Amino acid sequence: MATRIHGTQVEAVQGDITREEVDAIVNAANKTLLGGGGVDGAIHRAGGPAILEACRNLNGCDTGDAKITTGGRLPATYVIHTVGPVYRDGNHGEPELLASCYRRSLEVALENGVKTVAFPAISCGVYGYPHKEAAAIAVDTVTTFVQENSGLALVRFVLFNGELFSIFEQALDIVA
Ligand code: ADP
């Protein structure tokens, strides 16, 4: 599933984000930026110690914000670390914070000359965000951003499993 929005290709694929050959991959990190499980663990394992070393100088990251480091040994040049909200009941600012993750990651990307970006499904693992709602927020926020900003050639959602992949595909279908 791929769609073109205001000069940016927006698409969903199933796969492992650590293998993506894009300018930057986004990490669903925790506030310390000092490593975790899930996609964070996979990125640090694949990219090697240079990423953690760079993270140590960043003083953590607030929920909804994003910070950039080297991609170390990854095919991607950079990793953009963002911190998704832990889902409680949807009434604790979760939708706004999740949208902010996508928006801030893309702002940081543009500030650093990044033209191609891959996102995982932020907050959709241990942080427990309901998948359909999270996909709608991800697609809406990215769509709005690329309509309002030029400079990005590709935004790719990389979903680890088939269930999330089809949910993101359906969310993209709606905007296509
Ligand atoms: P969070 O703490 O934000 O919920 P997780 O890392 O627990 O982050 O999960 C976020 C999503 O990333 C989940 O859907 C999980 O399946 C997925 N994921 C885990 N490893 C990878 C990977 N190597 N590539 C892409 N997605 C991954």
Image: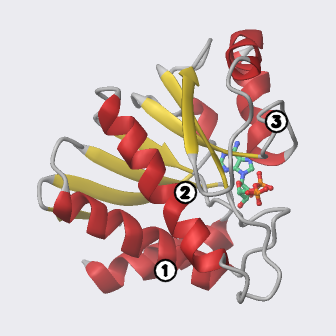
Please give the residue where the numbered disc 2 appears in the rendered image: 101
Q: Is mark 3 within 8 Å of ligand 1?
A: yes
- Between disc 3 and disc 2, whose residue precedes? 3
Q: Quadrant of residue 135?
A: bottom right
Q: Quadrant of residue 44?
A: top right
Q: Which mark is residue 41?
A: 3
- Between circles 2 and 1, the one closer to the viewer is 2
Which residue is located at x 46 percent, y 50 percent?
Answer: 104
Residue 28 in the image: above or below residue 115 = below
* Local secondary structure at mark 1: helix
| Amino acid type, label 1 | Ala
Which residue is located at x 44 percent, y 28 percent?
Answer: 21
Query: Spatial distance from mark 3 to mark 2, Cα to Cα?
Result: 19 Å
Q: Dot 1: within a 10 Å radius of its alpha carbon, few (fewer than 14), some, or many (20 or more) residues? A: some
| Amino acid type, label 2 | Cys
Q: Quadrant of residue 124?
A: bottom right
Give the left or right position of residue 174, taking residue 170 as reference.
left
Tell me residue 52's x, y (percent): 76, 19
| Amino acid type, label 3 | Gly
Tell me residue 168's x, y (percent): 50, 72
Residue 102 in the image: above or below residue 44 = below
Please give the residue where the numbered disc 1 appears in the rendered image: 136
